[in-house]
Amino acid sequence: MLLSHHYAQDLPSNFSSPVTPKPSPNPQIIALNEPLAYELGLDPHWLRSDEGIAFLSQGKRPDHLSPVAMAYAGHQFGQFVPSLGDGRALLVGELTSKTGEMFDLHLKGTGLTPFSRGGDGKCALGPALREYLVSEAMHALGIPTSRALAVITTGETIERETPLPGAIIARVARSHIRVGTFQYFAAKGDIKSVQTLADFTIQRLFPTIQLDDPKRYHALLTEVTQRHASLVTQWLSVGFIHGVMNTDNFTLSGETLDYGPCAFLDVYDPMKTFSFIDQHKRYAYGKQPQIALWNLSRLTECLLPLLNEDEDSAIQDAHSILHKFDSSFHHEWTNLFRHKLGFEKKDEKDLQLLEHFLETIHKGKADFTQIFRTVSSENAVLHNDYRNVRECVSSNQGYIDLCQTEIMHRLENETRSPAERLRAMKATNPRIIPRNHLIEQVISAATKGDFSPFHSLHAALKHPYADGNDGFDAPPHPNEIVEHTYCGT
């Protein structure tokens, strides 16, 4: 195991705070991601030992160095909070994988830290299982994300609306440096720390950028902007709603982080939200691109003094970089949704066709995942038979016929065979996603001590594009529809 402590040791002490968490009464591993453990150079057998469980539940390192709570600020639902920090999480250190890549090991639910702000620092079992399932599903879907290494029950009872079993989730990510980390120091006027953090971030995440390049901060902002334009596009392509796109959850690495009140679309609705906190729909499905740009603007404000000594020139440089977000996003979005309908070549009328298809399924109240998978079926692709597609909409079925005509006309420009197109579409449109009602069923069973539904769903989610008849692809029945999700704090 190659375990380093760079964030804690290479950055000044005001970036983090050492914490020694108390041991849990009865820590038990209920889920261990053994393939990921092997990738990270960790021995699953050791992780299941008493020493390994202490490592995963307390951050107890073999070298006895203390894990740290990271300091950061953030805009939460548009309101700036100057000091947030890891209130219920710890950075144990950095693991170097067998391929030489470095990953943070982060534990959530370990107890109080200096940043707990009155909370208990604990995590209930439900949110830990949600993050494990959804983050691993996102990885299987090919979307940049933090990953789940383990879920450990603690033997404690956590007081929320009702008493709940306690848990800790161990996750890994390329980095936990966030926009909020930069905001923490920028809000204090500590430009030296902003520059120190920017250089550390470049060295850690963007090694192709030279630290002696006078334009390195322009390059950093450009890279982060492009990564998030791509990330949000991928979210939209699978119907994912992050739910809490605060700047303290917005990573410089371009990975999806924090799966508290997240959810996936059932019926397609651009203004859909699930998070109970998001009463004003700030983070609705269709608003996520503009929020990503808003968050990037907050990062840019922190970096302005580093872009140019002249403020007007710095602002001009910043605008030039941020303007690239729209073009990158629209290019990525059009490409992804073009592929979802089976088009390989570009056509200037594709955007109009895609918007018409989405408007049709919105009016027809179609299940987002189901209708795109049905458009990818053998009947639709090989035989131009859209009867099953038509059945995916509950009203305005005739409009699907018009979409079919447009799609058939557009396919005249394609050179791939129908069989090749079928394979490509099935690899683009997932059959299964971590549907909200299935997650709730898993959590309900687990809180009663039955983890078999969790393991069954997790196994299926590893292969989201494969055909199957496990029932996990079915939309919820009316009595199963989940209206709200919660962050678990």
Image: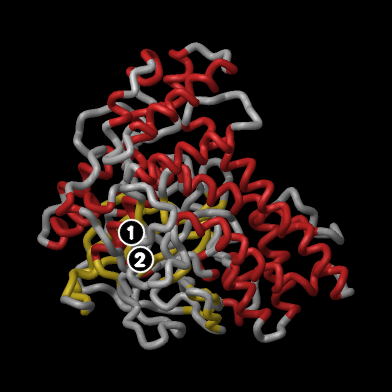
Q: Nearer the viewer, residue 16 or 130?
A: 130
Q: Nearer the viewer, residue 483 or 348?
A: 348
Residue at 44% over, 13% down:
419
Tag 2: Cα neighbours inside 10 Å, few (<14), some, or many (≥20)? Answer: many
Q: Position of residue 429 (x, y in %)?
A: 41, 33
| In this view, 17 is above or below 287 | below
Residue 62, image quadrant: bottom left
Residue at 61% over, 82% down:
14
Q: Position of residue 249 (x, y in %)?
A: 50, 66
Left or right of 354: which side holds 59? left
Q: Nearer the viewer, residue 19 or 297?
A: 297
Residue carrying label 2: 275
Mark 2 and mark 1: Cα distance apart in space: 35 Å
Left or right of 374: which side holds 76? right
Tag 1: Cα neighbours inside 10 Å, few (<14), some, or many (≥20)? Answer: many
Helix, strand or loop under label 1: helix
Residue at 34% over, 44% down:
34
Residue 5, image quadrant: bottom right
| In this view, 213 is above or below 461 | below
Left or right of 382: which side holds 300? right
Which numbered disc covers residue 86?
none
Callout 2, which amino acid? Ser
Residue carrying label 1: 52
Q: Quadrant of the C terminus?
A: bottom left
| In this view, 295 is above or below 76 | above
| In this view, 192 is above or below 466 | below
Closer to the eye: label 2 or 1: 2
Q: Position of residue 268 (x, y in %)?
A: 37, 47
Helix, strand or loop under label 2: loop
Residue 220 visible in the current orientation: no
